[in-house]
Amino acid sequence: MPNDDTLIGIIPTKLGVRLFPGETFEWKSEVLIPLFHEWIRRGIPEGIPIDVADYSHLPEGPVTMIVGHEGDLICERQPGRSSLVYLLKRSTSGETRTSDALGTALERAFQCAASLEKEYPVEPRPHFNAARLEIFFNDRLNAPNTAEFYETIEPAVQNAFVSYPGLGILAIGRVENDPRERLTVSVESVNHSQISLDAL
């Protein structure tokens, strides 16, 4: 296994971080749309936010999102749960390591989640649990959903969390999904079942 996480032939910037706002929480597009337009005026999230897109008519998948130059912020609805995704689409500062790109995505995801907790204008508000999250690689060609590739990428995932000692010891593992789906990694704190964003 390589000693660093520079992956030859891999562009390590097409990846996402998924956070969960609570088991029963549901996004409301009529609340998110004006809030996200205000965020764009304030430059949130980082990475040149451009526009707001509404997909609330779909039964699952994106509800409302901020489309950006470097990445997208997506409030999504999946069967039985809601989630918040920051999807990094392109290099922001010439990152050459997957852990650097993932670090950027983590930072922006946590920042946006914290802002939603404070600024979501109606009850119930989202309350994110940092003790459990997912990472996925949005590049099936260069990041295949295989056990062999996961063994290659795992050190990069571990390195990206060095900046978050508040999460404690982490259990990191590949999600056993359909091989045709994107490679997804589960990250859970071994020490804590609940961690607030303020503790990071």
Image (cartoon, rainbow, N blue to C red):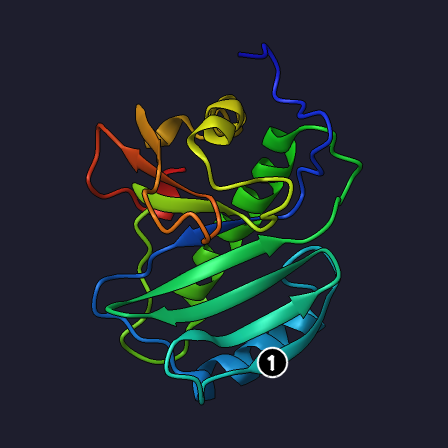
Task: Say left or right for 171 vs 121.
Answer: left
Task: Say left or right for 184 vs 33.
Answer: left
User: Which amino acid does the dot numbered 1 rest on?
Assistant: Ala
For this orientation, the residue located farthest to the right is 94
For the point 72% across and 25% down, the residue is 8
Q: Depth check: 17 or 21 in front?
A: 17
Q: From the image, tell me which residue sits under label 1.
A: 53
For the point 62% across and 77% down, the residue is 38
Assess disc 1: are there few (<14), some (14-19) or many (≥20) residues with their C-alpha within 10 Å of its C-alpha: some
For the point 80% across and 36% down, the residue is 94
Give residue 165's position: percent from left, percent from top: 40, 26
Above or below, 94 relative to 139 = above
Give residue 166's position: percent from left, percent from top: 36, 30
Indicate the quadrant where residue 173 lies: top left
Q: Is residue 60 visible?
A: yes
- Of helix, strand and loop, which one carries label 1? strand
Q: Is residue 161 visible?
A: no
Give residue 79's position: percent from left, percent from top: 28, 70
In this figure, what is the number of numbered marks? 1
Q: Depth check: 124 or 71 in front?
A: 71
Above or below, 124 relative to 149 = below
